[in-house]
Image (cartoon, rainbow, N blue to C red):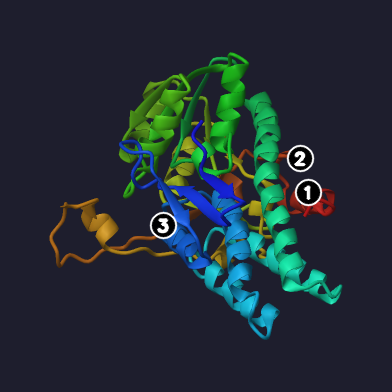
Amino acid sequence: MVETMIWQSDDQLLQVLDQTLLPQKCVFIDCKDYARVKLAIKRLEVRGAPAIGAAAAFAMVLGALECADKPDFLTALAKVRDDLISARPTAVNLAWAANKQYALAVKLNEEDKPPYKIIKDLEAAAIKIYNEDIARNKKMGEYGAEVLPQDAVVLTHCNAGALATCGWGTALGVIRSAHAQGKIKMVYADETRPLLQGARLTAYELFEDKIPVTLITDNMAAWTMKQKGINAVVVGADRIAANGDTANKIGTYGVALAAKAHGIPFYIAAPVSTFDFSIASGKEIPIEERAAEEVKSFRSEQTAPSGVATFNPAFDVTPSELIAGIITEYGVVTAPYIENIKKLQEKSKEDF
């Protein structure tokens, strides 16, 4: 599996894999300041909720280095945090990691630690977030593999693999674990318009790992369910509300509706850091809208009239009643979601 990011401690820089160039090129970008990490997040050079969270944690280290000599270190670092969070409003892991790092800096400042010692502790915390993400994904994969049937024919949407995380993956982590157990017959991957994360990234990951995969366009999903014996859908998430409503890449809601119509269980795979316990339902999830050019062109080629109006939300929200279960590193959460998500919150408090 290709690494999504590499922290160079000696040089104090974060190298991020430019996912916009995959699968044709494998290029790492040197991020020497927090603003370059923010730009990488905004441009989708680094993407996927857990990977964005880890990148933000390292960006806070770079931001702290830039703030070290300022008269009010914490005020300057708070501005870095707020600027980072503004990069992508829907993916909650971004705010989770940035706020976690800032809270640590506040705590250490109250202990009278100087900025250079705080920065060292922020660096250690970012490395811990990175390493723990991989461990959590593998645990999630074990729980998820249990709910998939033997000879599973799985449909997935967008990319929730190693490239969307620090390694292994969430939805693709479940598929990887099930494949290791000999349970995967075929994976159908939606290409995922308009940026083709399914075609460029998911198909690439599974093909490289020799996991059987068939690429389909987004508008083939329902027909593929009917014709190809799909018996499970597994996708990732960018934010999960306290009632189980889930935001994920645009197109997920339609996949969930089609799965319901065909009697196919629809699963979300996401770590606890993707839950937003502070919001009651999906109605409160902010939905990022992206540039019209993403719909009217692909890379450098124009594919629509220049003046045509576009609607380009990056995410949609799948209501919890369409979800058979939410696979986490603590087990699979099922309905009643409000009650069981509260239990999950209590169970995970010590870790988060």
Kindly identify which residue carries mark 2.
330
Q: Nearer the viewer, residue 19 or 234?
A: 19
Could you give the CA–CA distance between mark 2 and mark 1, rounded to whole angstroms?
8 Å
At x 77%, y 55%, the residue is: 352
Residue linked to disc 3: 314
Choose the circle earlier in sequence order: 2 or 3: 3
SS at mark 1? Answer: helix
- Front residue of 88 and 232: 88
Q: Position of residue 248 (x, y in %)?
A: 50, 50
Residue contact between numbered discs 2 and 1, judged by CB atoms under 8 Å: yes
Which residue is the extreme one toward the bottom? Answer: 71
Say which label, 3 or 1, has the lower sequence index: 3
Q: Is residue 71 above or below residue 4?
A: below
Dividing the picture into quarters, in which one does residue 223 lie? Answer: top left
Question: Residue 202: which numbered mark, if any?
Answer: none
Binning the other alpha carbons within 10 Å of mark 2 as few (below 14), some (14 to 19) or many (20 upward) gives: some
- Give me the C-alpha separation between circle 2 and circle 3: 28 Å
In this rendering, is residue 47 above or below 279? above
- At label 2, the amino acid type is Tyr
